[in-house]
Amino acid sequence: MKVTRNTPNQLILSNTPWFIGISLIFFILAFVGAGLFIATEGGEGILFGLFFAVFGGGMGIGAFCVFVRRVQVILDRPSNSVLIRRQSVFGYDTVEHELSNLSHAEVETTTSTRDRTTSKMHRPVLILEKGMSAGRHPIVEAYVSGHGAQRLADAVNDWLPARAVDSDSQSA
């Protein structure tokens, strides 16, 4: 996820998982292509080739549906709104909150231990302190490693107290 617009009146964070999407498309094409190639050889390979194409392609399509999600968060001062938009193969969802209810952003961290190795994963969350939606609202559902979640939380926290620029007024 990255900051795509940072002006005094608007902050837009967005994530489009191009790499995962394109990789899964190649995965699907490879399994379907190999399966169809085996099936066209004839003989006993027809059923195996069709199974290979359907099962492998189906697994790729399932992974595409689960993992490829576009997320966009728009913090807009003039309309006093926070929009969280999520788009997947199954549809489009928008959640709207009042910007005045947003207190700050934090990073949630989860720790897992495997083979005596500890790893930490993070995700940014928006903290709404008042209103009907008071509570913690994750920007993205998945936890990721690295410093990206902290960069996003810092961007939101730096943007929130900034003074909005009135486009109608002129500086003297």
Image (tube, helix red, strand yellow):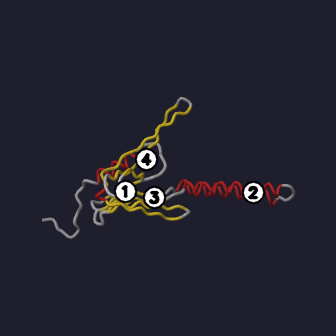
Callout 2 amino acid? Gly
Q: Which residue is mark 2?
A: 35
The mark lying in front, picked from 4 and 1, is 1
Q: Tell which of 71 and 37 is nearer to you.
A: 71
Q: Which residue is mark 3?
A: 71
Callout 4 amino acid? Arg
Give percent across and percent down for residue 143.
47, 46
The mark lying in front, picked from 2 and 4, is 4
Few, some or many C-alpha atoms within 10 Å of disc 1 (few <14, some 14-19, many ≥20)? some
Of label 2 and label 1, which has the lower sequence position? Answer: 2
Q: Which residue is mark 1?
A: 133
* Furthest residue toward right: 43
Judged from the image, the secondary structure of the residue bearing numbered disc 3 is: strand
Few, some or many C-alpha atoms within 10 Å of disc 3 (few <14, some 14-19, many ≥20)? many
As drawn, 1 above or below 80: above
Q: How many marks?
A: 4
The mark lying in front, picked from 3 and 2, is 3
Q: Tell which of 39 and 87 is nearer to you.
A: 87
Q: Which residue is mark 4?
A: 123
Between the C-alphas of marks 3 and 4, the distance is 13 Å
Quarter of the image with the C terminus is: bottom left
* Furthest residue toward bottom: 168
Of label 3 and label 1, which has the lower sequence position? Answer: 3
Between the C-alphas of marks 3 and 2, the distance is 34 Å
Q: Tags 4 and 1 in contact by the CB under 8 Å rule? A: no
Q: Residue at x 56, y 30 (%)?
A: 115
Judged from the image, the secondary structure of the residue bearing numbered disc 4 is: strand
